[in-house]
Image (cartoon, coloured by chain):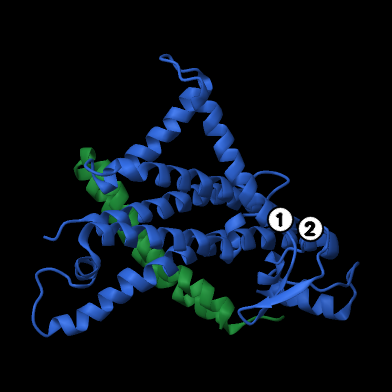
Amino acid sequence: MSGIGSVIIRSEGGEGSGGESFHAPGPADFDLPAIGGGHDTFSMFGQDFVAGVTKPMLQIVLAGVLVFVFFYLASRKRAMVPGKLQFVGEEAYGFARNSLGRDIIGSHDFARFVPYLFTLFFFILLNNLFATIPFIQFPTFSRSGMVYGLALLSWVIYNAVGIRKHGFLGYLKLQCVPSGIGGPMLLLLVPLEFMSNILVRPVTLALRLFCNMFAGHLLLILFALGGEYLIVEMGGAYAPVGVLAWVLFALVAFLEILIQFLQAYVFVLLNAMYIQGALADEH
Amino acid sequence: MDGNLNMIGYGLAAIGPGVGIGLIFAAYISGVARQPEAQSRLQSIAILGFALAEALAIIGIALAFVL
């Protein structure tokens, strides 16, 4: 605490080598400029947007292309005894098919959802790993708009699946009326279940992925910039603290790789669970 | 130093999900210790519970920046 206090006194007094005060990173650091500097703005939904292509837009397209190319190459020469590439592709497919599809949705009708779940998992995983891959180092889904698209897609899919199987009213009854409860408790529970199962689900689904990527990247920016400030601007006795910050940066970066995998897994797991819930028969 | 009271509020709000996630994984570990063959089944349940408890912390961090 006293260290933080003396930072302020020093930077206010301007006796440090640079004399520049430290600006903590914030959400504004995620507003990347358009590539090539687009200056045309247009307004939509009461907000001003810059017309142009930004880095996360390129990344999301790149991820789609890379996932397609990898699995196309892995499955192009299908041999009885798989080569290295085919083996990796099959292991990846088997993981998504078995642990995300079959174990959650059930062996009866999981097969038609496997392409969606499988693609979604590797697409999200690659987009998350962009935060760690050198020279890219920006998680695509730390821009919330990217995630809302995926959440909308999953919302449409699980509702459409449920409505197709049970009919509109039957599906609403399945999602909103908990079984085994009768009488006046239903007045309380039906609106709650409707809120939680139909309205809030896509929001939490999107926010979970977005905020994990956002918070992780923000933490890394803080460690990197804070360490740099301590070493370069403060110097002297503060420099070892800056080195410590960089060590922590490396450790947190490894933790981030774990979180990136886990969030891709959780997103697809919840997708599969919502589909399973929409398909479930009434008890 | 600039700062925001929101961040202290978020720190306090993260205690609840922290305790919750700890309890979920404690139950998962003791479940696997008693019955190792149930691991694959327990794992997805544990991760689901983790994701749901974590959602509270996540909503907190979103609101800390928005409010």
Chain letter of disc 1 in the image: A
Q: Residue at image x 41%, y 70%?
A: B56
Q: Residues within 10 Å of mark 2 (few under 14, many from 20)?
A: few
Point out residue B25 in the picture as x, y percentages from the top left corner.
33, 55
- Colour green belongs to chain: B
Tell me where residue A114 sits by quadrant.
Answer: top left
Q: Colour of chain A?
A: blue
Question: Can residue A106 be seen by looking at this rendering?
Answer: yes
Check the residue under mark 2 and report the chain it is in: A
- Reading the chain from its start, which is encountered first: label 2 or label 1? 2
Q: Are marks 2 and 1 in contact (CB under 8 Å)?
A: yes
Q: Is residue A27 above or below residue A116?
A: below
Task: Say the numbered circle drawn on residue A55.
Answer: 1
Quarter of the C terminus of chain A within the rendering: bottom left
> Compared to B39, does A194 lie above or below?
below
| Amino acid type at mark 2 | Ile
Can the viewer see residue B25 in this picture? Answer: no
Q: Which residue is mark 2?
A: A35
Q: Nearer the viewer, residue A80 or B56?
A: A80
From mark 2 to mark 1, how far is it between C-alphas? 7 Å
Up the image or down, B56 lies above or below A56; here it is below
Residue B45: image x %, image y %?
A: 28, 53
The image quarter containing residue A186 is bottom left
Residue closer to the observer: B13 or A40: A40
